[in-house]
Image (cartoon, rainbow, N blue to C red):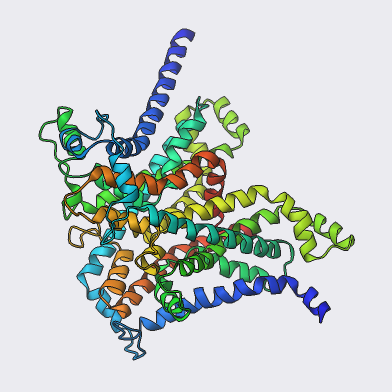
């Protein structure tokens, strides 16, 4: 009887593992297809199939995607747009994170009459469909002389990212005991001193979560990129979309796939290196937001 | 003077964000709302024509298609992602070896942009060279899969790609929920002789109610905002068969110079989000007050 039970249990376990591995395979398959396709030449793509390993791997598609593929009328590959994205992401992440840290600090520990209401009003910004602000924002950027510029895109990402960064820091700082603030005040420390000497040293994890969240959001953005950039200032997502939809002299699926991986690589790398913090940001931003 | 500054420091720190928020969120929403009441085309102009743009919007067959698509997409995307996410979470919660690695694999698509996802699936679903060829090579001769170019089926390719991208995230939400279930509760149920299925159905699932709620809100939010995925995977085509409201808004505002109509479609999207958000926030707040 007990041995029978044991086998039944084992079959159950095997079934669970089988299902889990099957889905792991399903989730990985697109990445595998992208990668193998990017290493094939166009002949092999036509004669083989999605799952076939490349017979004669070549980096032709990678080279072309990086430096000479056409994205519309320009044919300089993704490289210039990759650096555009870097130039947009780095300042936007830094500024929105710092502003969010200060805002969160005030909203958590220096509440004043109306600050809760302000927080609620700001929170709403995490949810609005951006279509509703696209046009006036374009007008404002035009008035500031920032239309079609990298600076303009940085500004837009900071403005609409601060709601999230504030939320992250506020929720984190709420958990830090207010006694610490009181004690520091008794010692004569002021607003900034307390922030600098009490809160900043405790903030490493929330800085990591926020930076990763903002980095992923802004790197992956397409809507703001496509509306507010001009030729030459497009971020990589826009360039990738243009590359895929430009077919000068026949479709090169291998180049498309290499380009897609290049566009995905930075965020994937962050996810692999700091997955724990990425997930924490997702659930914090999502559940609490 | 210095004293005043010091006293009001928190307010001063918050002031820039407050001003920007009032202008760039609420002000802009009002601006778009007003614009939707004018007959603006290329440039904003302030001849008010009441709800004319909304009438034109609702009479536009392309908007009809976009809204229908949104409902199809919303319902299928949410149900499939919820069921898949829940089952994977329950399976993963059975003290699995290498759980971390498997979880990482399920969740990585969430780190990728919708443009990359769309590009990848556009190739995988390619009629002729994609899945169709794979199945033919594997011996399923005559297997056809051309959803990407079929009027009635294109929207389902969006569902496939979106589920692939987001279901791992739903799994993570449920897994976090499952880990929060009191062990004494499951132990007690087991002592009472409940089978695993009964345990989950009668004891654990009812406890997951808040997770269901937040997952639905998040997925709805993703769905209503979905713009890039459609743009990259189908371009809204064939024709405009797989347009979503966000794509409609973009096309009419930026390609067709009908900004009044575009503004009215953006306002309807906002109302759609509010219709889901307000009841959710209301119930959240009520729960908090009950605690």
In the displayed structure, B125 sits above or below A145; it is: above
Say left or right for A199 vs B35. right
Q: Residue furthest left?
A: B142
Residue drawn where x is 39% and y is 40% of the image: B84
In the displayed structure, B289 sits above or below B19; it is: above
Q: Residue furthest right?
A: A187
So how many labels did they put on this image? 0
Q: Nearer the viewer, residue B169 or A276?
A: A276
Residue B145 image point, x, y percent: 17, 42
| Quadrant occupied by the N terminus of chain B | bottom right
Residue drawn where x is 55% and y is 76% of the image: B22
Residue A129 image point, x, y percent: 42, 66
Residue A268 image point, x, y percent: 45, 43
Q: Residue furthest bottom?
A: B47
| Quadrant occupied by the C terminus of chain B | bottom right
Residue A143 image point, x, y percent: 45, 81
Say left or right for B166 vs A38. right
Q: Nearer the viewer, residue A170 or B113?
A: B113
Kindly indicate the quadrant of the structure image that contains residue B283. bottom right
Say left or right for B161 vs A156. left
**Residue B230 visible in rendering:** no
Residue drawn where x is 63% and y is 71% of the image: A117
**Residue A154 visible in rendering:** yes
């Amino acid at each position: 009887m007990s041995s029978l039970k044991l086998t039944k249990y084992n079959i159950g376990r095997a079934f669970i593992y089988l299902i889990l591995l099957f889905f792991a395979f399903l989730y990985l398959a697109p990445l595998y297809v992208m990668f193998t396709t990017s290493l094939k030449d166009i002949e092999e793509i036509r004669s083989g199939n999605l799952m076939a390993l490349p017979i004669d791997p070549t980096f032709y598609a990678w080279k072309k995607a990086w430096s000479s593929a056409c994205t519309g009328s320009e044919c300089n590959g993704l490289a210039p747009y990759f650096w555009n994205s870097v130039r947009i992401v780095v300042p936007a992440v830094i500024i929105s994170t710092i502003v969010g840290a200060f805002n969160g600090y005030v909203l958590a520990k220096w509440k004043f009459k109306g600050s809760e209401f302000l927080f609620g009003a700001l929170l709403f910004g995490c949810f609005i469909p951006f279509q509703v602000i696209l046009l006036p924002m374009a007008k404002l950027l035009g008035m500031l002389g920032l239309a079609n510029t990298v600076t303009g895109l940085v500004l837009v990402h900071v403005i609409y990212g601060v709601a999230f960064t504030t939320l992250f820091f506020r929720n984190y700082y709420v958990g830090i005991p207010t006694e610490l603030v009181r004690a520091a005040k008794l010692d004569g420390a002021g607003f900034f001193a307390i922030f600098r000497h009490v809160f900043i040293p405790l903030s490493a994890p929330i800085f990591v979560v926020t930076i990763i969240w903002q980095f992923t959001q802004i790197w992956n953005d397409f809507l703001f990129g496509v509306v507010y950039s001009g030729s030459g200032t497009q971020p990589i997502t826009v360039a990738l979309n243009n590359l895929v939809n430009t077919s000068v002299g026949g479709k090169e699926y291998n180049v498309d796939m290499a380009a897609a991986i290049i566009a995905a690589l930075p965020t994937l790398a962050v996810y692999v290196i700091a997955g724990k913090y990425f997930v924490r940001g997702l659930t914090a931003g999502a559940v609490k937001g | 003077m210095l004293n005043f500054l010091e006293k009001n420091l928190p307010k001063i720190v918050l002031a820039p964000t407050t001003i920007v928020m009032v202008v760039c969120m609420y002000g802009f929403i009002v601006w778009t709302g007003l614009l939707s009441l004018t007959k603006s085309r290329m440039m904003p102009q302030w001849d008010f024509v009441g709800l004319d743009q909304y009438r034109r919007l609702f009479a536009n067959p392309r908007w009809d298609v976009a809204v229908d698509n949104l409902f199809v997409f919303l319902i299928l995307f949410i149900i499939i992602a919820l069921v898949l996410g829940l089952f994977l979470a329950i399976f993963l919660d059975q003290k699995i070896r290498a759980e971390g690695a498997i979880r990482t694999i399920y969740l990585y698509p969430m780190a990728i942009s919708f443009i990359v996802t769309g590009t990848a699936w556009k190739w995988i679903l390619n009629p002729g060279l994609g899945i169709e060829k794979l199945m033919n090579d594997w011996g399923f001769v005559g297997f056809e899969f051309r959803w990407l170019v079929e009027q009635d089926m294109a929207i389902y390719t969006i569902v496939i790609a979106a589920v692939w991208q987001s279901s791992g995230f739903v799994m993570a939400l449920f897994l976090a929920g499952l880990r929060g279930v009191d062990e004494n509760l499951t132990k007690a149920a087991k002592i009472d002789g409940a089978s695993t299925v009964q345990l989950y159905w009668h004891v654990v699932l009812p406890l997951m109610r808040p997770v269901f709620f937040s997952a639905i809100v998040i997925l709805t939010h993703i769905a209503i905002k979905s713009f890039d995925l459609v743009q990259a995977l189908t371009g809204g085509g064939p024709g405009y068969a797989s347009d979503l409201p966000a794509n409609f808004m973009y096309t009419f505002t930026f390609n067709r110079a009908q900004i009044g109509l575009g503004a009215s479609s953006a306002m309807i999207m906002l109302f759609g989000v509010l219709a889901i958000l307000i009841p959710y926030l209301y119930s959240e707040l009520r729960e908090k007050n009950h605690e």
